[in-house]
Amino acid sequence: MSEAALEEVSVLSSIYCGEGEFQLLQQSAQDGLMVQINSTVGGERGLDVSLLFHLHPRYPSCPPDISVSSTSLSRSQCHNIRQKLLDQAAALPPEPMVHQLVEWLQGEEVMEDCRGGEEEVKESDKEEEWTAVLSLDHIRSRNRYIGLLERWSQQLQLTGRLLLGRSILVILQGARPNIKEFCRLLKTVKVDVDSSGKKCKERMMKVLIETPSSSSCEHGLQGFVVKSYQSSPELTAVFQEINMMELYQQILPSLSD
């Protein structure tokens, strides 16, 4: 990773020095840097927004990847803000830009653009609700791995279940782009350790199914819950409890492989 990126992260930690404002989530020569900045944007009527910046090893020669989440905004509004930030980043010269992007977002006009059309946004959110089931290969570093999954689900406004047993399954509900971002993070961030104890990525993750949430699941899942099971009947019972038996029947052949 570049000296400029490392220096920028050091500066950012000094600027956003309030409690919970800044966090360095990842630093490696292979994967680059991942930082989270929690900021209040929009002037006096400001809203709390969490920004996740992934600075690739070639940054700032290439713009950062950005994720946006907020308990004060809808998913569609977060998508709009993310796209505006990505567009702004693409238009900037190839030099450290994270602080500039955060300052730009704090402009009143930007947030006003993202506040409008609440009813239309809410309807759009309903249309975007998807359910996915992922299969993980192994979880050795349990606390680190599960902690990252819980953090990502919160940041991306996803709800779900992590089912630990013979098969390790992650059930996710939320906006489809956020589910795709969750999967991307799984494959690009070192979430676990291999058999020799070295940090590794989840390259063996499989998406067993990805489908629009059915009307029978309209109330959706709550939070991100970790649950262990010992047998196939117990796993079946979990899917019955969350009213997803039709989806379970569809993934069952994959679990028998």
Image (cartoon, rainbow, N blue to C red):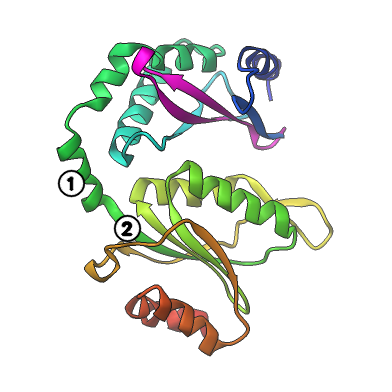
Q: Residue at left 33%, top 41%? A: 75
Is residue 53 part of the magenta span, yes or no?
A: yes
Q: Nearer the viewer, residue 43 or 4?
A: 43
Separation of residues labelled 1 and 2 (CA atoms): 14 Å
Evaluate whether residue 61 shows in this view: yes
Q: Main secondary structure of the magenta part?
A: strand
Looking at the rendered structure, the kind of residue marked 1 is Glu
Q: Is residue 63 visible?
A: no
Q: Position of residue 18 (x, y in %)?
A: 63, 19
**Number of marks in picture:** 2
Mark drawn on residue 123 = 1
Question: Does residue 213 sit above or below 64 in this rendering?
Answer: below
- Answer whether residue 217 is magenta in the image: no
Instruction: Relative to 172, say whether 199 is above or below.
Output: above
Question: Element under label 1?
Answer: helix
Up-down relation of residue 55 to residue 221 (above or below): above
Residue 197 in the image: above or below residue 28: below
Q: Amino acid at mark 2?
A: Trp
For residue 77, which quarter of the picture?
top left
Q: Is residue 127 left or right of residue 38?
A: left
Q: Is residue 77 left or right of residue 229?
A: left
In the rendered view, does 79 fall on the left or right side of 116?
Answer: right
The quadrant where residue 131 appears: bottom left
Q: Quadrant of the N terminus?
A: top right
Q: Residue at x 55, y 19 (%)?
A: 61
**Residue at the farthest right position:** 196
User: What range of the chain is rendered magenta?
Assistant: 28-54
Which mark sits nearer the N-terminus, 1 or 2? 1
- Please give the label number shown on residue 99: none
Query: Could you say whether the residue bearing mark 2 is in a helix, strand or loop?
Result: strand
Q: Which residue is mark 2?
A: 130
Please provide percent x and percent y for residue 27: 70, 33
